[in-house]
Each structure stands twice: as C-alpha cells, then as structure tokens.
Image (tube, rainbow, N blue to C red):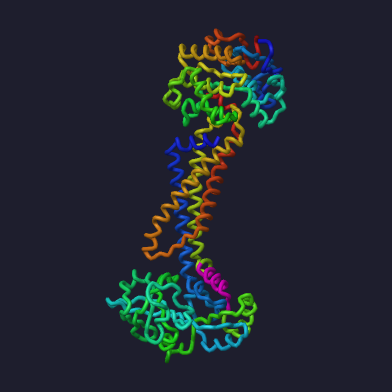
Amino acid sequence: MLWLAFRMLFQERGRLVITLIGIVFSTVLTLVEIGIYLGMMGNATSVVRHTDADIWIVSQNVPNFDFTQPFPANRINRVRSLDEVQWAEKIHVWFAFLKLADGRREQAQVIGFNPDTGIGGPWSMALGKPYDVKGGSYIIMDESSRQRLGKLEPGTMWELNLFREQSFKLVGLSREALSFTTIPVVFTSYNEVDRSLMGTDFEGQTSFIVVKLKDTSTVDEVARKLRAVLPDNDVYTKQGFIDRTVNYWTIQTGMGMAFFLTAILAVLIGGAIVGQTIYAGTIEHLRDYGTLKAMGAKNGDINLVILTQAAVSAVLGFALGVVITIASRHGIVSAGVSMQLPLLLFAAVFAIVVATCLSAAYISVRKVKMLDPVMVFRE
Amino acid sequence: MDKAILETRAVSKIYGEGAGRVAALEAATVSLSQDEVLLIMGPSGSGKTTLLSIMGCILSPTSGEVLVHGRNISAYRELELANIRRRYFGFVFQAFNLFRSLTAQENVEVVLRMKGRSKQKVHAEAENLMERVGLARRAHAYPRDLSGGEKQRTAIARALAGDPPIILADEPTANLDSRTGRDILQLLRSHAKDLHKAVAIVSHDPKVEEVAHRVILLEDGRLQS
C-alpha cells in the first residue's frame, strides 16, 4: 500500500505542489522566527554565558545584562571574604556615544573588564588579544559593528563619550560579541571606565560582581550566603541570571510571545493548507478508497495510504523549507539580524511539521473510516 | 455446476423503521456455483445492486444468511468480511472504478499487492492477466487514455487478479456500446469457463442473457423466478 501512496502522491503534482507550498511556508516561517528569537536571546546572554563565573551579583531588580544599575564596588570585599570564593571580579557595563568619522554619533555598549584575567572581556578575537586594552585608553570593538560604524582599522582613534569625551585607540577586534539591542559592543579595561567615572555620581561604583567558586557544587549555598551579606543586591547563579534575562525579554516585554505567536500561526496556517489539500485529495479519491475497501482492503491499509502521503509531504516540505532557511540565513545575518539555528530546533520543527501533517490527515482518515464501500456500485 | 460456492438464504435488507420502512430486498435465496454465470435482472430500484452487495459481503443483510464456500459469514465483523472479500471475490463495476493515478497494469498490480503477492510475482502475474484480456499493448496506458471497452477489460483483469473463485459484476456493459458490451460479456463467460469461476452479473441489458447459464429476476426486492 505504500507503493500506492507514493504513486497517488507523485502523480498528482499540482496538489503535491500546493501541499508542499503550505509546509515550506510553515517550516521557513517557524525556523526563521524561532531562529531569530534564539539569536536575540543568544545576544542578550552572550557575555554571561561566556564569562567563566558561577555567580553574578547585580543591583536589586536588574532584569538583564543590558539594563544595569550601578552599586558600590567595594562590596566585592564582602564577597571575597567568603571561604568558598576562589576569585571575584568587577565588570562595568555602560552606554556611551561613539563619534564617527563623518561626525555622526552612534550609541555603544561599553564593557569594562580586568585585562589581567580577561573575566567579562571578549571570548573570541578576530584580531589582537583581550589583554591589549591594559594600561591606557584602548578599546576592542566587535567586527559585527562594521555595518553601523564603518571601517574598523586597528590603530585608529575613536572618540568615546562616557560622561566625558575621550579618545581611545582601537587595538583589537572581537567576534560574536553582540548586544541584545544590536548596538555596537566596545570592550575596554575596567580601570579605564573607572577613570571616566571619576568626579561623577558613579565614582567607585560597578555594574556587576562576578564570582568563581572553589567548588561549584556549593553554588546554591554560597548564593544564599551572599544574599545575606548583600541585602541590597540580587545574587544569581550563572544559569539563574541567564534565565532571568531570557524571562525578561521573552515574557515581561511580550517579545517572546510575539515571536512564538507568529511561529504558532505559521504552523497552524501550514497545517490548514496541508489538511485542506489532503482532505480534498481524499474526497476526490473517495471512490478509489471505496473500491479498495470493496476489494478487501482494511481501513488500516487505506489509512496507511493517506498517512504516508501526509508524512512524505511533511518530510519533503520540511527538507525544502530547511534548504530555503539555510540559504536565506546569510542574507538575514548580513542585515544585522542575529539568527541561531541549532540542530535541536530543526529536530523540534520537524517533529511539529510531521505531527501537524498527520493531524491534518486525521480528518481524512475519519472520513475513510466512515466510508461505505457500497458506494462503489453507484455511478 | 452443482456445488454452491456462494449462497444467500432468505436475505432481507430493510432501511428505516415504521412508516419510513423500505424493504430493498426481501427473503432472497440465491446460490452460485463454480463455472456458472448467473444473471440477476430487474428494473431500476428492484434491489439488484443490494443483492449483489450482500452476495459480495459488502453490505450486511438485516436478516438471513450468507454462505461463502459453505461458511456462514453473517455474523462476521468488518475486518473479517474484508478478508473474505480479498480472498474470494473479484469485482467489476459499472463505472470501471480504475485508479486514475495508475496505469492499466498497475491497476491490476494493486490488487495483487493487496492480496500479498511477492513483488517478483506481482509484475509477471499482472502482465499475464493483461495479455489474457487482450490489453498487453495498452498495459502502460493510464485510464484517461483508454476506451470504455479497454477500461472494462482492465477492470476484468483486476477482478481476476489473485485468482478469486467468485466474480461479481455490476452492470458491466452499461457504459459500453453494444459491440464492446458483447465482447466484454464473452470475455467474462470464457473466463468463468476456462478459469472455473462463479460469475454473477447484475444487469438490465438483454444481451447478457446470451452468456448466462441462469437468470433470476428481481422486482420490488423480491425474486420472481
């Protein structure tokens, strides 16, 4: 009966094309939507994920890495006083303005880190080393910023306004350091940011304290202790801070819902198209199925024909959808939109597409189950 | 031609209840033997197709018994009836009922595959049947490219596929011209004889009488002869 399913499916090319359009549309839209969502979440959590720390200490109610609220940096001493702590480092995150060669200004996210340890600094370098920002007004910019900032030539000087205008020399280029807000990320030394804050209300303040433990299995216990000694701060485990960030962007802002709603609509519309074409095909073949039943085919045999057609359509449509998505990925990323397409996403969307197609075919299966083979004698 | 291969004993088919009760068939007792061509005649609405559906185990009677090869199948469930149909029956339909996505030969192959023939045998057996009905040259044509006579020959080859002992034909000449209809009837009769089949034909075409060994007449759901 599989043979019959294949013959019926590929003989009626018009219907197959319409079915495939529905599935391809559904697959591409779902993959792109969720891929962009994952890309944005990846950006939002990139520094946290790539920093080798077990605990993140932030100001109260700071919802993510981008929206920081400074707090006294000397609280790091309370952190270091705990026996379980291997090391603790401070990280600055501020928004500043970069002056471009043509006089325009672009907002930038400035991350100040300790170049001696590299904690909180760039994790992948296209040019130079994180350590290169030590001892002066040096910056590392991410190569993804070219689209907004133009040429990024090492050795060139950049005007960065963080409370005061100051010239910085570009000494390196990082890779994959993108912010959620898509504004350019600029790395410099923690001390350089500290100097910029001198004389302002934020002097002696920091954005984050990150902590590495001697024994990571004690992370929950140490986090509890830190909450006790730092009542004015929020203390997160690394995963906890990632979850908090994702939760903020996904649920609190409603952005995640918008993405998922589009993805769900894509699946539903694709499913409706597939269901409709398969059902129309079933109605058109009702006499064939009745004839098969009259000749001794069981309902299961005919169901196999219908479900095989739905499953084969799902696999073909999904494969085409994947090819289109991968082919368009470069264009999407070039336009400055982050997109992540992990294998798990493909597996999940494949399962959804197959399940949707089989569910859509179920209406046809029900129709055939109720089919009275006596109808074959009617002209 | 003595031993009945298919029997209906006082089968009735009643639709509806009370004032809306319609008896499509009443107490029809019919037998069909090997090598026999039985013609069931009657005007439209006389219950011919209902009787044929019951004989073919497609429709369950309201009362009475149906025996296939001596086995009473009246209480069988749908799945068991499907097995009986697959094993014992070949059908020829008035509207041919060929699968338009399949070639003429593939229409025969689909039944052989359904009957569990091995892949190796399916092709050879279908080819042989196409030759038997005189369609070897048109074996790879699709139904849309076949004439009415060729379609019905294909349908006969399909009915013969898997060597079922009983062939039931519903108005096999209704959509054919007179000459083609005669050819088809001769084909049915010769196969009944050569292959020792039992053939029941429902028709109101008088030509069919020429090939039938026995004729029964239905009127208002009742057997007249």
Q: Which of the two residues, A203 or B186, is positioned nearer the viewer here?
A: B186
Residue B88 x/y as whole percent: 63, 23
Position of A241 relative to A312 (above/below):
below
Position of B210 relative to B54 (above/below):
above
Q: Is residue A236 magenta?
A: yes
View extreme (left): residue? A102
Q: Is residue A72 magenta?
A: no
Q: Residue at x 44, y 27 (%)?
A: B142
View extreme (bottom): residue? A199
Q: Main secondary structure of the magenta part?
A: helix
Q: Which residues are magenta?
A: A235-249
Residue A75 x/y as whole percent: 55, 87
Q: Which of the two residues, B20 or B217, is positioned nearer the viewer here?
A: B217
Q: Residue at x 49, y 26 (%)?
A: B105
Residue A62 x/y as whole percent: 52, 77
Horizontally, is B6 left or right of B204 in the view?
A: right
Residue A192 x/y as whole percent: 41, 86
**Number of marks:** 0
User: Is residue A347 visible in this depiction of the protein?
Assistant: yes
Q: Which of the two residues, A276 or B213, is positioned nearer the viewer here?
A: B213
Location of residue B67 by image quarter: top right
Q: Residue at x 42, y 52 (%)?
A: A323
Q: Which of the two residues, A274 or A10, is positioned nearer the viewer here?
A: A10
User: Is residue A291 visible in this depiction of the protein?
Assistant: no
Location of residue B215 by image quarter: top right
Q: Residue at x 47, y 75 (%)?
A: A66
Q: Which quadrant is the N terminus of chain A positioned in?
A: top right
